Image (tube, grey):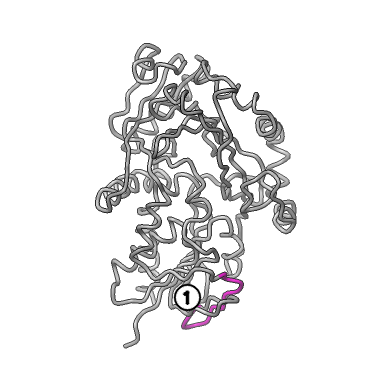
């Protein structure tokens, strides 16, 4: 009997974790990961804040809630077994005024409903014990929130797999018995395919026949970094109470593996899906964004918030002013520019910013699973997302 063949498009942390999970379950099969770049983890995996989220923000019962909590535990075990740094520095989510306290209480309730343990409500004095330089009327402490080097995790995952780099998928042929990934570097045929293409996920999904949306609208997140002599201002992660209208968590302070402390990100429309500099411009990406009906509806609904974010992007003083609401001692002289990231935010055709993870299916046998939305906490959840996707592929296979 021929060996069963699996292929995963995308060598970011979700794609690599998915390939590893499939191979662990079916070691007799061939599992191939393809990626257009020359190394793994080139995009969202290596351009995020490195935070391992505990699961306090997400709607109870959602995929994000379940897979984040499961994924955090799996990621901690993976790092321990592979000798990777995993620091539980903890996080405080700070209410900066009494008006934010009800929203913070809602986050506390969500965290409890999602099974996040050891959450603690803090008054101003207790907050000062944990973060002496932070200011707020109340805070929620999540001691299990951690930091990790997600690129290092991705490299460790890849070391166990067959990864074909420099393989850009430009078309997909789906037939009754197999799926063929086609590109300038050749072809890869498989019985089952999982698309984990991140910033290009909607495009690759359409190639596979899953064209029902949503579309990716890229948001660049810019960071600043504390100069070393001011890193004492932050002990762990310090976050604001997020605006419930948006899936972004606001400008926050993030210690990094290695000792640096970053503040950010904001969220401004990117002019290139893989554009990490303000000057990066890809006209086809801009055209695709403008042509998507959901973008126009989103822009009409949220243009004021967009202007605020753009102001923060163009003005260092405005960016620091936002961060000063959490750490008043901060000054513009305390920060230097740091690398930016781009978030693959899925937007439905009616302008709704997709909040939960979203998985699709395409092909004659449902042989292609498509990850249509998996931004933060996608990296935290990666090993749990992998198990979920492996279950979905197995169910499709068993139904044949």
Can you say whether 32 is above or below 196 in the image?
below
Residue nearer the viewer, 101 or 340: 340
Circle 1 residues within 10 Å: few <14, some 14–19, many ≥20: some
Residue 171 on the magenta span: yes
Q: Where, by quadrant of the figure, is residue 87 drawn?
A: top left
Q: Which residue is drawn at 58% across and 22% down?
A: 333
Residue 189 at x, y percent in the picture: 48, 80
Mark 1 lies on residue: 365
Residue 205 at x, y percent in the picture: 57, 65
Residue occupying the far front of the picture: 229
Q: Is residue 293 visible?
A: no
Task: Describe residue 304's horizontal placement relative to residue 236 as left or right.
Answer: right
Residue occupying the far left of the picture: 81
Residue occupying the far bottom of the picture: 1
Residue nearer the viewer, 22 or 262: 262
Residue 65 on the magenta span: no
Q: Give the quadrant of the C terminus.
A: bottom left
Can you say whether 179 is above or below 251 in the image?
below
Task: Describe residue 21's horizontal placement relative to residue 346 as left or right.
Answer: left
Residue 267 at x, y percent in the picture: 61, 38
Residue 229 at x, y percent in the picture: 46, 24
Question: Mark 1 falls on what kind of element?
Answer: loop
Task: Describe residue 286's horizontal placement relative to residue 390 as left or right.
Answer: right
Q: Give the quadrant of the N terminus.
A: bottom left
Magenta-tinted stretch: 168-179
Q: Residue at x 39, y 71 (%)?
A: 162
Q: Residue at x 59, y 60 (%)?
A: 202
Residue nearer the viewer, 364 or 390: 390
Q: Is residue 251 visible?
A: yes
């Amino acid at each position: 009997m021929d060996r069963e063949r699996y292929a995963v498009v995308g060598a970011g942390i979700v794609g690599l974790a998915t390939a590893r999970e499939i191979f662990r379950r079916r070691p007799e099969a061939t599992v191939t990961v393809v990626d257009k770049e020359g190394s793994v983890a080139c995009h969202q995996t290596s351009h995020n804040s490195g935070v391992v989220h505990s699961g306090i923000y997400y709607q109870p019962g959602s995929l994000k809630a379940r897979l984040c909590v499961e994924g955090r535990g799996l990621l901690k075990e993976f790092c321990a077994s592979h000798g990777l740094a995993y620091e539980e520095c903890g996080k405080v989510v700070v209410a900066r005024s009494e008006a934010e306290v009800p929203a913070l209480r809602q986050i506390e309730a969500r965290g409890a409903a999602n099974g996040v343990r050891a959450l603690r409500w803090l008054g101003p004095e207790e907050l000062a014990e944990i973060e002496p330089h932070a200011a707020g009327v109340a805070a929620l402490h999540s001691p299990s929130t951690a930091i990790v080097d997600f690129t290092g995790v991705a490299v460790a995952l890849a070391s166990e797999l067959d990864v074909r780099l420099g393989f850009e998928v430009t078309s997909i042929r789906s037939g009754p018995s197999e799926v063929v990934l086609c590109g300038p570097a050749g072809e890869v045929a498989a019985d089952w395919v999982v698309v984990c293409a991140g910033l290009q996920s909607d495009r690759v999904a359409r190639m596979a026949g899953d064209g029902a949306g949503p579309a990716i609208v890229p948001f660049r997140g810019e960071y600043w970094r504390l100069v070393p002599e001011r890193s004492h201002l932050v002990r762990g992660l310090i976050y604001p109470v997020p605006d419930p209208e948006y899936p972004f968590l606001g400008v926050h302070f993030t210690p990094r593996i290695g000792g640096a402390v970053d503040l950010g990100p904001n969220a401004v429309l990117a002019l290139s899906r893989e554009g990490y500099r303000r000057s990066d411009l890809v006209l086809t990406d801009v055209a695709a964004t403008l042509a998507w009906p959901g973008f126009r509806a989103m822009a009409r609904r949220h243009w004021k918030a967009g202007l605020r974010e753009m102001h923060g992007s163009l003005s260092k003083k405005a960016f620091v002013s936002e961060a000063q609401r959490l750490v008043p001692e901060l000054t513009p002289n305390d920060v230097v520019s740091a690398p930016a990231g781009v978030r693959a935010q899925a937007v439905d055709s009616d302008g709704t910013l997709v909040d939960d993870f979203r998985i699709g299916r395409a092909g004659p046998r449902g042989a292609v699973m498509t990850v249509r939305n998996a931004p933060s906490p996608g990296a935290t959840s990666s090993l749990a997302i992998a198990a979920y996707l492996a279950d979905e592929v197995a169910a499709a296979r068993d139904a044949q």
